[in-house]
Amino acid sequence: MKYLFAAVILASSTVSYAAAPAITVYKDPNCGCCEEWVKHVNQAGFPTRVINSTDVTSVKTRLGVPASFSSCHTAVLETSGQVIEGHVPPSAIHKLIANRAVKGVAVPGMPTNSPGMGKLNGNLVTADFQGKPFSQD
């Protein structure tokens, strides 16, 4: 009986991981906080593909990231093309996935209360690319 229970738990965790869309992350090869953010979203069930680049600015321009929202890395949801700029928490990524009308979300700069930089404290605001608050974590 306990083996059946373990098999069900394992199968359900695999299904939930596979259900999360993959994220392509563009980052500078020398940025440690970007690596920490990638680890954080991986632990939340998002598979990632990392592309190291010394010219992330051109990626941001190509993807339409407003300059005022720029951060240290840029990511794209592979299923929808929606953009994730900076240290956006997984809860905001799930909310973005649920609202395909939103082109992208950002946590501008490198705030210390964001994934990959520090511990979430309930005061981190993620904005959409129109500048409206999108999520608070």
Image: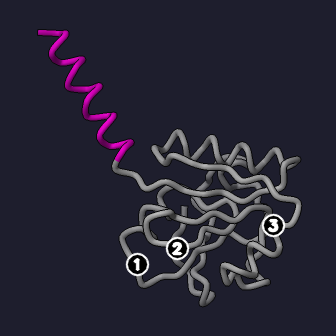
Mark 2 — residue? 82
Task: Name which residue lies at 29% across and 40% down.
Answer: 15
Sequence-first tag of 2 and 3: 3
Let me know if residue 2 is in the magenta part.
yes
Does the residue at mark 2 contact the one at mark 1 (Cβ under 8 Å)? Answer: yes
Q: Position of residue 136 (x, y in %)?
A: 54, 67
Task: Name which residue lies at 88% across and 60% down.
Answer: 54
Mark 3 — residue? 56
Comparing marks 1 and 3, which lies closer to the viewer?
Answer: 3
Quarter occupied by the N terminus: top left
Q: Which mark is residue 100?
A: 1
Task: Name which residue lies at 63% across and 87% down.
Answer: 131
- Disc 1 crowd rating (10 Å Cα; few below 14, some 14-19, many 20+) is few
Q: Which residue lies furthest to the left in this view?
A: 1
Position of 91 relative to 68 (above/below): above
Left or right of 15 in this view: 88: right
Position of 68 relative to 94 (above/below): below
Q: Which amino acid does label 2 sit on?
A: Gln
Left or right of 13 in this view: 48: right
Position of 80 relative to 6 (above/below): below
Task: Out of 3 and 61, give the one closest to the viewer.
Answer: 61
Q: Give the range drawn in magenta.
A: 1-18
CA–CA distance between discs 1 and 3?
24 Å
Task: Name which residue lies at 41% across and 68% down.
Answer: 97
Task: Out of 51 and 110, give the one closest to the viewer.
Answer: 51
CA–CA distance between discs 2 and 1?
8 Å
Element under label 3?
helix
Does the residue at mark 2 contact the one at mark 3 (Cβ under 8 Å)? Answer: no
Quadrant of residue 104 within the rendered picture: bottom right
